[in-house]
Every structure is written in structure tokens, then in C-alpha cells.
Amino acid sequence: MFFDSHAHLDDRKYGQDRHEMLMRAREQGVSNIINVGYDIPSSQRSVALAEKYDFIYAAVGIHPHDAADCGEDGLDKIRKMASHPKIVAVGEMGLDYYRNLSPQDTQQQVFRQQIRLAVDLGKPIIVHDREAHGDVMKILKEEKADQARGVLHCFSGSMEMARECLKMGFYISIAGPVTFNNARKLQEIAVEIPIDKLLIETDAPYLTPEPHRGTRNESSYVVYVGRCIAKLRNIPVEELAAATTANAKILFGIT
């Protein structure tokens, strides 16, 4: 059984066939999915999706793209939503210096606030990091994010960065790009990460893996990520699936 540890299945791209898409995931052996919010409306939709399907859990948070629109009211809403029994993490949160849709200082402030909120609530965090590796690590350390633990989702940093995250008790999640022919560095990292700290994800509807690259991603495609990493590590895919599923359940407190 596979565990898709990060997806956005509330997206309007699934408006015509969401239930059928979810059933395909189940048929492909996907046991659980974490649907991840990135602003207040998507967080609310994530809660609703988790309420509707027993195998879906949710995370609520403010993506760095939306940090400028957060405000104290936004953080209060995240706090209230996080009390729901199927909310298993705060996020996604972090820094994105690639698109810079919110000012960098605002991204950093909202990132820090959400880490503090997660520590206070006793919830793990889901971290988004795009071309901001140094500041992400600086903030994680300064805000003592090891007290919350969490995952660096769709990891894009170096192995040295991964080792620093592992020292803090964080997990590393690998997504569809590991299946790309030009992803040698990520493939090497996928092999070197200790298997008890490894998660897999789709980030659907984005980052569709081979052989479906260029089309809408969906949770059933996490199987391709798992197969690729198992092949790289030279282990049975069943072993990879069992380990990453167990890891996700430990991190998110799912029994």
C-alpha cells in the first residue's frame, strides 16, 4: 500500500471527476492521502475533503505565495481549523524565492509564525522550499522547528541540506521529478536518504511523473514515484511502499 503524503485534490482541475480519480488511487493501492492547504479557502476545502473520505487526512496552512494576504486573522483561522481531528499537520508553509509572489520578508514572517503555531499545537509542519535553501534552514533552526518535526516536501535541496534536516528529525519527501531522466542529483538523494526518513508524494495536480509527464497529476501516480525509487535503491517495491507508508503514519500520527 502506498501513501501519497502531499496532494492538492481539492483543485478545480478535478471538478469533473474527483471521486473517480480517488477511486483509481484506491484501486492502485493508495491507502492514504494528505490533502494540503495553501491558503484559507484551500485549507477549508481540505478539511471538507477529509471529512468526506475516511482515507484522506488534511493539513492547513499558508503557502509563501499567499503570505502577503495572511494577516493575524488568517493565522487565527488556521489555528481553529487545526483542532479538527483529521488535521494532521500545519502547512504547507515556507519560502519561495523563485516566483516571489509575496515579499521575502513577509514570507519569512509568516513562515516563522506558522512554525510557532505548530509547536504550540503539537503538530508537524509541511515545508515548501524553492530556491530559498539557506533561509529555510536558518528559520527552521532559529524557530526550533525540531520541536514540531515535519517534512521537506518535494525536496529540491542538496544532500548536505538533507542531512541537516535529518539531524532535526525531519523527513524528506520525494515527488514526481525523481522519475525524470535529467534528475540525477535527486535520484542520488533518493537512494541516500535513510529509508526510515523517506516519504513519497505526488503534489498533484502538479509535477506529474513519467510516463504521464505533461498531463494532470493524480494520487494513483504515486505508484510511479515508489517504483522508481525502489528500482534506484535496488529493493522490492513492496518494501519501499511499506516503509514510506509506515513513516507517513508515524509523522502524521495516523493509526
Image (tube, rainbow, N blue to C red):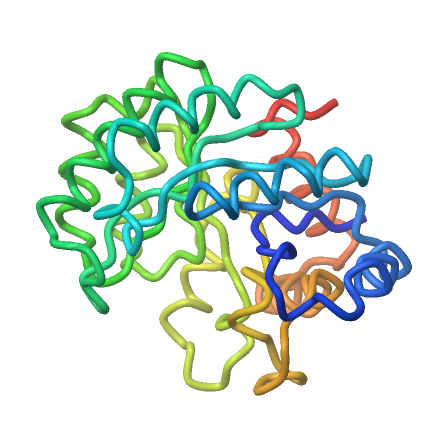
Q: Residue at x 33, y 28 (%)?
A: 75
Residue 155 image point, x, y percent: 39, 56
Residue at 20% x, 24% y is 143
Q: Can you tell which quarter of the image residue 120 is in?
A: top left
- In the picture provided, is 210 more to the left or to the right than 22? left
Hey, which residue is sitting farthest right in the picture?
Answer: 27
Horizontal side, residue 13 vs residue 192: left or right: right
Q: Nearer the viewer, residue 243 or 63?
A: 63
Q: Residue furthest front?
A: 73
Residue 168 in the image, given as x and y percentages of width and height: 32, 29
Q: How many marks?
A: 0
Question: Could you say which is closer to the camera, residue 167 or residue 85?
Answer: 85
Q: Is the residue 63 above or below the residue 75 in the image?
A: below
Looking at the picture, does residue 3 appear above or below residue 115? below
Indicate the position of residue 95 as horizontal and vertical percent values: 24, 50
Residue located at (56% from left, 47% from top): 199
Residue depicted at 86% across the width and 54% down the height: 26
Q: Is residue 104 above or below residue 207?
A: above
- Taking 168 as reference, is 234 left or right? right
Which quarter of the image is occupied by the C terminus? top right
Q: Quadrant of residue 167?
A: top left
Extreme-left residue of the structure: 105
Give coordinates of residue 207: x percent, y percent: 52, 72
Q: Is residue 30 left or right of residue 65?
A: right
